Amino acid sequence: MNQLHSVPMLSVCIATFRQDEYIETCVRSVLAQAHEVTLEILIGDDGDSPLTPEIVQRLSVAFPGCIQYFRHPQNLGASANYQFLISRARGEFIAHLDGDDFWLPGKLLAQLKVLREQPDLAACYTNALVVEDDLSLRMLFSAVGPKRFDLAFMLAGGNFLNHSSMVYRSQYKDVLLGFEGAFIDYKMHLHLARKGDLFMLPGAFVAYRWATPQSMVQRTPGKVQQWYWDAMVSVLQCPEVTHAVRCNALAHYWGMAASEFLIKGRWAWSQHWSKEISAVFPVEFRLVYWRGWRFALGRLVSLSFAALGRKVAAPLVRVLHPR
């Protein structure tokens, strides 16, 4: 088993908060791959998890020299919790795993093989199975893969990458540590893409739990949307982003906001984002305004046909992030 004084090939950063019922499955899914990859496991507990310390202590005794556990006296928030762990990671590569998710066999070995064979890649991801609490399959996380893609591709279609699947080169960890305030995984993906291409492996190597109580999407959807926008703005103004790429990204984002009006009747929401986008990118927004509405209309039609199809036939496995 790994020893803490040796330099691991990979550091696994697990951020957890009120996930007593999930954390053992999560950590064991990593330990199951420790015989294939030399690794260290860094667990950041954001407090208020009464059973987690005991669970992690038991696993640390069973697997000595592999786990470092940090229980924060005050809640840091998901972003700062991950930054805390990343700053202590010693491996050549770094992986992230949310405390309510878990990995499937062979994940790390497959990703490290790709990263070693293609040294210009900044990070490698896999698809994920979206599961219910009873582990029944709900859908596939992403319709993309396998594929090599760049920053322009990431901006044009939004976030389709599963956070708990990411493995990246530790030489880029300062990029993530430099973020200020709260952020979402999309910001990490975008800024890693500035350092090199990203790669999506074929197959699903992660089980992503659907709508758990501590999910940011469930608890703070408005904040998540704002953080998503902040992530885009943080790279859209970079010199390497062309005018065409910027327009494609804004058209997609505005189209999603406009969809909220057409599908859910949220006029105030679409108005808010119309003003927000035009305030930051007035020239580009004038060029893509009607493209966004056409995107929203097309999405409405697609969803209507999909709903009709589900009424007349047994549905195939859906995807959370179609492209």
Image: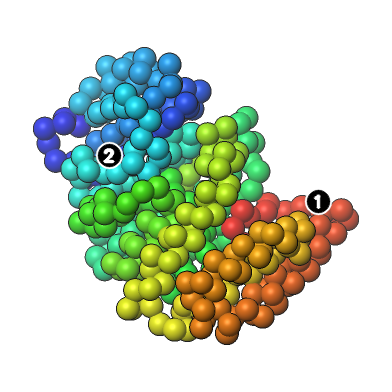
| Residue 253 disc label | none
Q: What crowding class fits label 2: few (fewer than 14 Cα within 10 Å), some (14-19), or many (20 or more)?
A: some
Position of the N terminus by quadrant:
top left
Q: Estimate the x, y position of residue 197 in percent, counting from the top left.
A: 35, 68
Residue drawn at x 59%, y 64% as measured from the top left: 273
Left or right: residue 48 compared with residue 64 = right
Q: Estimate the x, y position of residue 180 in percent, counting from the top left.
A: 32, 51
Position of the C terminus by quadrant:
bottom right
Of all residues shown, which one is farthest toward the left?
Answer: 5
Instruction: Tell me the quarter of the picture where residue 147 sits.
Output: bottom left
- 291 or 91, nearer to the observer: 291
Q: Estimate the x, y position of residue 44 in percent, counting from the top left.
A: 33, 32
Residue drawn at x 62%, y 36% as measured from the top left: 132
What residue is shown with label 1? Answer: 314
What residue is shown with label 2? Answer: 84
Q: In this view, does 153 lie above or below 319?
A: below
Amino acid type, callout 2:
Phe
Instruction: Tell me the quarter of the picture where residue 175 sits.
Output: bottom left
Residue drawn at x 44%, y 60% as measured from the top left: 230
Where disc 2 sits, the SS reads helix
Mark 2 → mark 1, Cα distance in angstroms: 46 Å
Q: Earlier in the sequence, mark 2 or mark 1?
A: 2
Q: Estimate the x, y position of residue 100 in percent, counting from the top left.
A: 48, 34
Q: Is residue 311 visible?
A: yes
Circle count? 2
Q: What crowding class fits label 1: few (fewer than 14 Cα within 10 Å), some (14-19), or many (20 or more)?
A: few
Residue drawn at x 55%, y 43% as measured from the top left: 220
Q: Residues at badges 2 and 1 in contact (C-beta under 8 Å)?
A: no
Amino acid type, callout 1:
Ala
Where disc 1 sits, the SS reads loop
